Image (tube, rainbow, N blue to C red):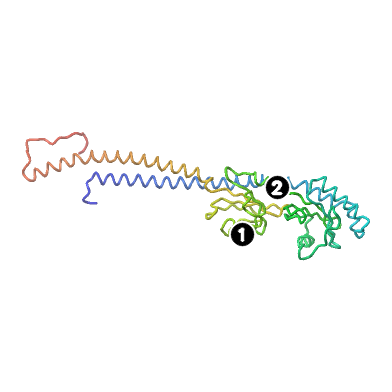
């Protein structure tokens, strides 16, 4: 360093200071923008999106829920169940169930007796419940809930359906309908968050129930889908959690519990979509700062050369004087009016 000419020392100092300031200002600016965008997403956009999706889903299930409630409170069916489910009344019950199914464009309509375990549909007695295979009914009976909504495969049509199970007046039996979930699926598939953000349904146990991507099969574990153990952190019945993944998906995730459906609505937004504009702005700032720094370094080098040139000229003349080779009748050329 001590052997370097002054002009190089000045250039290195000025250039280093400028580059350091460019790096620090870009780093601080990028961090501030990321915090601002992430905060806006967590506080405003994601909760608003989750509210809109859950409201739309609740609207879709409100009508079949009302129908199931009316069936469960029907005086005729309640009396028939109470009086022992007579064979004579079964035809009328089947006709009623057929009417409820057809009039409401349902996949099925049903009554399940808590006393006998008989499962009745529009075709009559369908089967008798098995405590091992039909845990949904016995779990529901042990709960205090007036109704439950369950996604399951319809045994006859072999397709996914939403079953609305509503408790009867005496609280011991269930009536309701099974609706096609096509409308809910279409709602989920068509709902977009930004350019590439998606919405899907996950059970409390962490299994994906409905996903807009047909290659994602129902029942796939969320942790396997994300390839990260995040379901316990994300799925909270009492709060809306927003997390950012850093592995396979590299996305921002948020989940909200939907009590009527006993499931979580999950929003997934690719990190690139959120941070892409910030990164583009950062790259532009870096390029601009580098150009400005280069210009300033060039100016600094020019100034350094202007300072060093007369100093070098004076040094050369002094060396000539010291060696006795100087012409003492000549004056040193001075081009500036400054100290040098």
Task: Pick the quarter of the image with the C terminus.
Answer: top left
Q: Which mark is residue 93?
A: none
At x 90%, y 53%, the residue is: 91
Residue 99 vs 114, above or below: the answer is above
Q: What residue is disc 2 on?
A: 184
Based on the displayed image, in which of its 4 quarters is residue 48 positioned? Answer: top right
Residue 128: give x, y in percent of width and height: 83, 62
- In the figure, is residue 44 to the left or right of 24? right
155 vs 68, nearest the viewer: 155
N-terminal label among 2 and 1:
2
Q: What residue is disc 1 on?
A: 232
At x 36%, y 40%, the residue is: 291
54 vs 155, nearest the viewer: 155
At x 82%, y 50%, the residue is: 69
Residue 268: give x, y in percent of width and height: 59, 49
Counting other residues with Cα less than 10 Å from the Cα at mark 1, is it few (<14), some (14-19), or many (20 or more)? few
Mark 2 or 1, closer to the camera: 2
Q: CA distance from mark 2 to mark 1?
A: 25 Å
The single residue placed furthest to the front in the displayed view is 157
């Amino acid at each position: 360093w001590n052997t370097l000419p002054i002009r190089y020392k000045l250039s290195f100092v000025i250039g280093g200071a400028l580059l350091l300031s460019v790096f620090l200002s870009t780093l601080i600016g990028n961090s501030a923008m990321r915090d601002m965008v992430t905060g806006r997403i967590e506080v405003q956009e994601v909760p608003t999106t989750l509210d809109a999706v859950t409201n739309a889903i609740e609207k879709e299930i409100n009508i079949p829920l009302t129908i199931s409630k009316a069936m469960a409170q029907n005086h005729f069916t309640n009396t028939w169940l109470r009086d022992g489910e007579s064979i004579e009344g079964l035809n009328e019950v089947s006709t009623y169930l057929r009417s409820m199914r057809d009039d409401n464009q349902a996949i099925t309509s049903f009554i399940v007796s808590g006393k006998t375990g008989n499962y009745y549909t529009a075709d009559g007695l369908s089967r008798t419940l098995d405590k091992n295979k039909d845990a949904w009914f016995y779990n529901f009976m042990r709960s205090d809930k007036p109704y439950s909504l369950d996604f399951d495969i319809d045994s006859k049509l072999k397709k996914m359906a939403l079953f609305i199970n509503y408790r009867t007046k005496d609280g011991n039996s269930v009536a309701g309908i099974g609706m096609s979930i096509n409308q809910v699926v279409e709602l989920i598939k068509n709902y977009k968050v930004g350019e590439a953000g998606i919405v899907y349904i996950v059970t409390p146990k962490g299994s994906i129930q409905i996903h807009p991507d047909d290659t994602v099969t129902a029942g796939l574990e969320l942790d396997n889908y994300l390839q990260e153990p995040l379901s316990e952190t994300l799925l909270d019945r009492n709060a809306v959690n927003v997390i950012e993944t850093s592995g396979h998906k590299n996305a921002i995730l948020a989940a909200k519990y939907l009590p009527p459906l006993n499931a979580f609505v999950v929003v997934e937004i690719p990190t690139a979509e959120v941070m892409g504009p910030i990164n583009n702005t950062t790259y532009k700032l870096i390029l601009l700062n580098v150009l400005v720094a280069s210009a300033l370094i060039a100016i600094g080098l020019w100034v350094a050369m202007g300072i060093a040139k007369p100093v070098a000229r004076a040094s050369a003349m002094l060396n000539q004087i010291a060696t006795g080779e100087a012409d003492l009748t000549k004056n040193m050329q001075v081009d500036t009016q400054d100290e040098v």
